[in-house]
Amino acid sequence: MVVEIDNKIIKYQELLNDRDPKKRLNNLESILKRESGKLVRKQLDYYINNHIHTTFSFSYYTPVMSIWMAFRSGLQTAGIMDHDTISGAREFMMAGEIAGVPTTKGVECRADFSKTLLEGRRINNPDQRSVAYIAIHGVSDNQIDRINSFFAPYREERNKRNLLMVQRLNEILEPVSLSLNFDLDVLPLSYALQGGTITERHILFA
């Protein structure tokens, strides 16, 4: 019985992580109808998570899969919060409507506080001094495109840095005859072609 349930969960995860967003949403609706009355949903009154990363920055979970996990976990509210992009927001919102999970939409970025009174201090980033994570919460539906356009240049600059990182990594790996190809090894791991962000985590994973 345990193996059967595990196999079903694995199958559901595959369906909800399909590369096609329309299929993901349709699969979620089908799964919820099929499992109606059978799903055991935890009751976590007052528990929310409005800082959920998805495949649009770096995560195993698509926006639809994230909502499925939020639903199963009993979260009262779930919020998408990807790095330098809000491209997964509409899918996240539609999945929330299907599953009956209230959603919020936001985006996270890093800001450089050099040449300010906070220069040299650890703010809320344990890895870098003078750099802070900033989260924009509660983006309304009619501002998604505007916010995404604002962050488009940042994604472009991030990719310039990513290419330099891959180049430097290849220099380090050359003595052991290993190398990474950004277009073949890193890009396919991301949702960059759908407006997502490529992070240093994608490079590490590749």
Image (spheres, grey):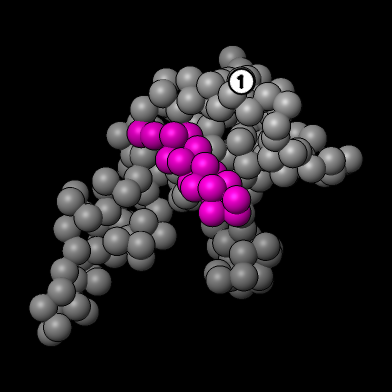
Which region is colored magenta?
1-19
Q: Residue at x 54, y 54 (%)?
A: 3
| Outermost bottom residue | 175
**On screen, residue 119 above or below 12:** below
| Outermost right residue | 45
Q: Residues within 10 Å of mark 1 (few under 14, many from 20)?
A: few
Q: Is residue 179 left or right of residue 129?
A: left
Residue 193 picture quarter = top left
Residue 65 picture quarter = top right
Q: Nearer the viewer, residue 64 or 52?
A: 64
Q: Is residue 154 left or right of residue 71?
A: left
Q: Residue at x 36, y 56 (%)?
A: 202
User: What type is the residue that disc 1 sits on?
Assistant: Lys
What element does badge 1 sit on? helix
Residue position marked by numbered label 1 in the rendering: 33
| Outermost top residue | 142
The image shows residue 46 at horizontal and vertical percentages of: 88, 41
**On screen, residue 42 above or below 21:** below
Q: Is residue 182 left or right of residue 71?
A: left
SS assignment for the magenta stretch, majority: helix
Q: Nearer the viewer, residue 34 or 113?
A: 34
